[in-house]
Amino acid sequence: MSDKALPTPLAELITDFQELGEKDRLQLLLELSDELPDLPERYADHPELLEPVPECQSPLFLTVEINEDENVALFFSAPPEAPTTRGFANILHTGLNGLPAQEILGVPDTFTEQLGLTQSVSMLRMRGMHAMLGRVKRQISEKIAAA
């Protein structure tokens, strides 16, 4: 799988991870966890509007919005004491937020393997990130079909 098939922001993040050693990759993941945007009030005050991702080892909730141009906004919620989960959520947010729906739907489910974290992060946690992407794609597909 080449980076050419990935959206540019996501490909750039993968490159950032690949250029680092294993220990520094974990540090970058922790830095990304600190940068996960807060939920806007319309979701922070209504957590029932967010979908849980039970495959994640820590509580994670998400939702997507699609505007009239079919660009996607991603929203994630995870507790501060879950830095790996928050880091994964912010990889998706940084790499995909604001992109056209069809571009996100085309992201290969296996892109996470290119981050180089499989030696440092458990397969259960990696499965959680796969599940986040799967739910994002499913919500996008459902919202497009309903429009």
Image (tube, rainbow, N blue to C red):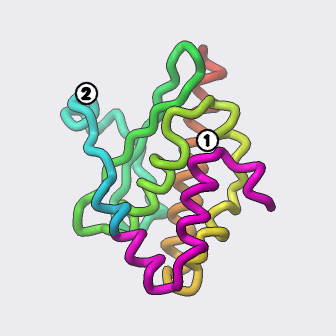
Position of 110 relative to 20 (above/below): above
Characterize the magenta stretch by its predominant secondary structure: helix
Position of 27 relative to 38 (above/below): below
Queried whether the magenta region covers residue 15, the answer comes back as: yes
Q: Which residues are magenta?
A: 1-30
Residue visible at 25% across and 27% down in the picture: 42
Identify the mark nearer the N-term, 1 or 2.
2
- Give the residue type that dot 1 points to: Lys
Percent across and percent down for residue 146 are: 60, 18
Q: Which residue is mark 2?
A: 42
- How many marks the image carries: the answer is 2
Q: Secondary structure at mark 1?
A: helix
Q: Is residue 84 left or right of residue 25?
A: left
Position of 23 relative to 71 (above/below): below
Q: Is residue 130 left or right of residue 24?
A: right
Q: Which residue is mark 1?
A: 137
Percent across and percent down for residue 141 are: 64, 31
Callout 1: 10 Å neighbours few (<14), some, many (20+)? many
Q: Which mark is residue 89?
A: none
Q: Quadrant of the C terminus?
A: top right
- Give the residue type that dot 2 points to: Arg
Percent across and percent down for residue 99 are: 57, 34
Q: Secondary structure at mark 2?
A: helix
